[in-house]
Amino acid sequence: MRIDSLDIEEFANGEHRGMEIESLSSDSQLLQGGSRTGKTLTFNAILYNLLGAQHTIDLATGRQNEVEIGFTNNRRFFRGNPEAEYETEDETLHGSEASETFSEDLGDTTLLKSHFVHSHIGKMPLDDLSRAQRTRLIRSVTNQGLEQRISRLEDAKEQLDQLVVETKDTKRRLSEEESDLDRKISDLESQKEKYERLEAQIETGELAELSKQLKRDEKLETELDDLFKEKEGLRKRLRKLHRKKRKQENYESEVNEIIAEAVNDFVCPTCDRRITTEKAKNRINRGYCPYCGQNHSLDGLKDRLSQKIEESDDLLDELKEEIQELQDQKDDVSQQIDKIKEKRPELGELDGFTKRRLDNYDHNIQKIQDHVQEELESISNSLEDLQSDQQSINQRSEEVEQKLEAYSEALSHSSEMVGELTEESFEAGIQEFSDAWEDAYNQMNSNLQLGISISEEGRIQFPGRNNLREYDRGGNLSGSELQLLNISFVCTLSRFTTENDVIDWDTIVLDEPFSNLQEDENMEAALDYITSLDKQVIVTTSNSSIESRFDQVEELEREPLQTKLGEFL
């Protein structure tokens, strides 16, 4: 499918309208004009019609657009106001249905857009594609079946990877719940043990004897009472300080981990899904908000946390000193209590827990016994509930562990399969494409021959005698090389697309393709190559000296344009 006619009634906020160009029937079409005559606007208007406003390059199109293209398969598509319209041999569709059907008929958006080469370095097809997209695109035109298999496996791998991350997060949360339950159970068991010991003291009469001894010596009772209260107060203060110390120690963890773990504890109110820790970390590393994914700087948050970490170091030292002082005081009180018990062996089984119960119930043994039975029953019920929860969490943890193992094994298998098929695709098509691309580039370049190598990861490299250059940043490529590499890449891509019936598209659009070619020999070689292609080639240029090399030439004037290009064959 090629472009048969183009009618730009209005485009880019009215910048492009008012000129007609008719009766064109050529394989190579040149649109020639000076500055601001609509060359790049025409390039973008075609992109706008085919793919929509979001795919135009370096241009905000505005809303008042009316662009219509007719195709050699007797179809016509209009995009703009008041609504899209798609005319086929059998019917005419309107609105969103027209846009969706037209998009489905065109096929792969990335592949189609790669048939357009913009004039600006950095806006060309290879710049618009990531390394992974490059290899996928090349596989799609050299071995579509293999690319589809790899694509399905990569989708499965991505889903499995997400499942592994989510399952790990679930495992982490269950582990936290399990630790919390263990702590609560341990506390209750300790309480139960104390009450059972007190119950035994009541049954043997030991508690009544202790009560009698304390009542006989009020001075001793008062002294012990003060000591036990002081010890209990110190114990509570120590417990509080230890919690504070643990909180401060958490700030010593890696900052991104703190943020990511915190985000994972929130649930989206819209979709009821959690942000996984791994996703949060990835967003943070790219400078995005870990929760909403927006491009927000986290420097302020990180600085505040870092400051908090520094402050926590000083505070931790203070807490450790205070804890040690309190511990020494508590030990001193314990020693005083032990000395009293040495003098009064009959008080050997007396502790703070027992003394508080005697005081709370005014040494009434029956009331203490009722209290003990009531507390033991309550503690037993609570323990039973917590142990049931613990069993449930243990079971869930086992299930999660089994899922994690299964997901991890499937992920590993998918990764191996992707690796094997990627290697197969390299041997089956990428190397063939690389050779064809290299040949196309060297036909367009009259200077030294350039070797082109494409790695499995999508790196584009140029081996040389003294060094290895690369297309991406730091490749030290000239503007001429960058432009010729993109043009030759698109021409090679279009050749394989047609030969392998990937999509029904046979048109290449080049905006100022010779702007960076400083040498006449290179321009001549490039002209010879693109005009000899068995393709429809539409070229915009400000260079009037190359008009004779094209089948059809139209001059654009510096005024609002209405361009009507008819019968591109």
Image (cartoon, rainbow, N blue to C red):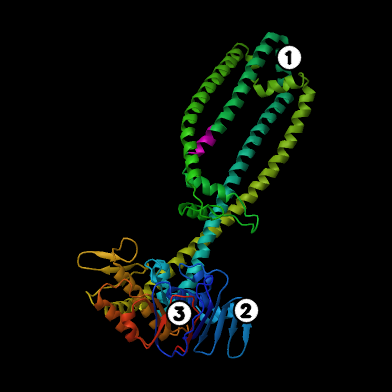
Q: Tell which tag, 1 or 3, sits nearer the viewer.
A: 3
What residue is pinned by disc 2? 97
Q: Is residue 217 visible?
A: no
Residue 420, quarter of the rendered image: bottom left
Q: Residue at x 34, y 64 (%)?
A: 472
Q: Are marks 3 and 2 in contact (CB under 8 Å)?
A: no
The C terminus lies in quadrant? bottom left
Residue 132, given in percent of the width and then of the height, sits at 42, 67
First-in-chain label (1 vs 2): 2
Residue 475: in magenta span: no
Report helix, strand or loop for mark 2.
helix
Q: Badges 1 and 2: C-beta atoms under 8 Å apart?
A: no
Which residues fall within the magenta stretch?
Answer: 245-251
Q: Earlier in the sequence, mark 1 or mark 3?
A: 3
Residue position marked by numbered label 1 in the rendering: 212
In the rendered view, would you say 466 is above or below 276?
below
Visible residue check, residue 558: yes
| Label 3 element class | helix
